[in-house]
Image (cartoon, rainbow, N blue to C red):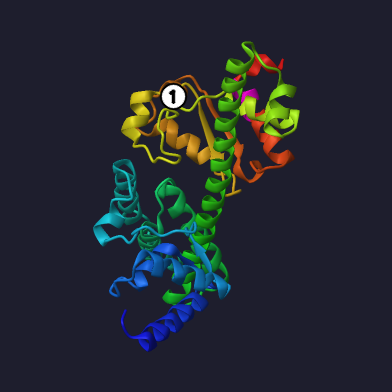
Amino acid sequence: MADRAQFQKKLGELLAVAASQNNKMTSQEVQAFFQDDNLTDEQMNLVHEFLMSQKVEVIGYTGTIENTEKTEQEEKDTLSQQEKDYVAEYLIDIEKMAKQTEEEVTLAYYLPKVVEEAVKLHMPGIFIGDVIQEGNVSLMLYLGENKKATEAEVLEQVRAGIRVMLESHTEEKRRDKKMVERVNDLDETIKSMKEEYGRKVSVDEVAERMGITEDTVEDILKLAGGISIFDDIEKGWATPSWEEVIERDPEAIVILDYTGKDDIAAKKEFLETSEYTKDLTAVKEGRIYSASCSDMQGSAGSAATVEQIAQQLYPDMFK
């Protein structure tokens, strides 16, 4: 953007948009706002930093922007084929809903719009059904207390609820990534010390070398006991397709509940009934486990969750 005054005006407009959304925006929304201005990655980073300096929460921004602007077609492609099928079937189910009472008519009107908002805000790595569910919860809670609200007000509440969920998911990914890095660091340290000493090494020796407590080493070792079916992928955070999951056929599945709304049962039911997952070894043998993401932090909570997962994966070790 060549005109400085025009750019400053547009920044003001962007702040106004953020203010209308409770000072929350997704990185994707920020980039879309400037899509016709040909900003460089560095300039776009500065825009994000400016927003955060003005107390605007930018969801999905990790400190760098590398040409992540998406076209409408690319946005659609963030959904896997399984998710696209899910959305199509869900919309058909909405059409079949009863529309006798005023409440039923209102709900049938808004539910497809919730789907639209969920697809727009969807981020890779999170199941679209969860995003839709969060939007529906926000919809029903708001309509229950604001029956005369305008469509704009209703949909803003839907978007706000979805953004909170995505923010939580982003934070969980950061924490999970740190845990994965700690597991990898521990693995490399143990291998290096074995080669150096020519023997197995003890927990206290590893703890001293890494500068952490023995309890922390043991927690990481327990977590490392379950090997990811995608641990050969060098990329820190990949988004594999359901076809790849089927091909690698996991022996156990751990469901992470990051919403704190007890949706484990719904996810387990999906795994047990979906044509994509019902024949997986883990599903057929009933080895579907769960853990709360809210506890998986660098604290006593993470240790408890690590032990919880270990107990579910290897019950004989804890008798």
Instruction: Kindly give the residue lying farthest to the front in the view shown.
Output: 196
- On screen, residue 110 versus residue 291, left or right, reads left
Q: Return the residue nearer the eye: 197 or 266.
A: 197
Residue 67 locus on image (x, y percent): 33, 59
Location of the N terminus (image quadrant): bottom left
Outermost left residue: 73
Residue at the (44%, 41%) spot, across then down: 237
**Residue 279 appears anywhere in the view:** no
Q: Quadrant of the C terminus?
A: top right
In the foreground, 277 or 58 = 58
Residue 139 within the segment the image draws in magenta: no
Task: State which region is magenta.
Answer: 309-313
**Res. 151 in view:** yes
Q: Is residue 82 above or below residue 14?
A: above
**SS at badge 1:** loop
In this rendering, the answer to whether 182 lies above or below 224 is below
Q: Nearer the viewer, residue 16 or 62?
A: 62
Q: Which residue is mark 1?
A: 250
On the image, the x and y values in percent for residue 153 come to 47, 75
Circle 1 packing at 10 Å, graded few (<14), some (14-19), many (20+), is some
Image point (52%, 78%), residue name = 19
The picture quadrant where one finds residue 104 is bottom left
**In the picture provided, is 56 more to the left or to the right than 120?**
right
Q: In this view, which residue lies farthest toward the top? A: 199
**Front in this rendered view, residue 276 or 18:** 18
- Residue 152 picture location, percent across and down: 43, 76
Rendering coords of residue 248 (x, y %)? 37, 24
Hey, what amino acid is under mark 1? Answer: Pro
Q: Main secondary structure of the magenta part?
A: helix
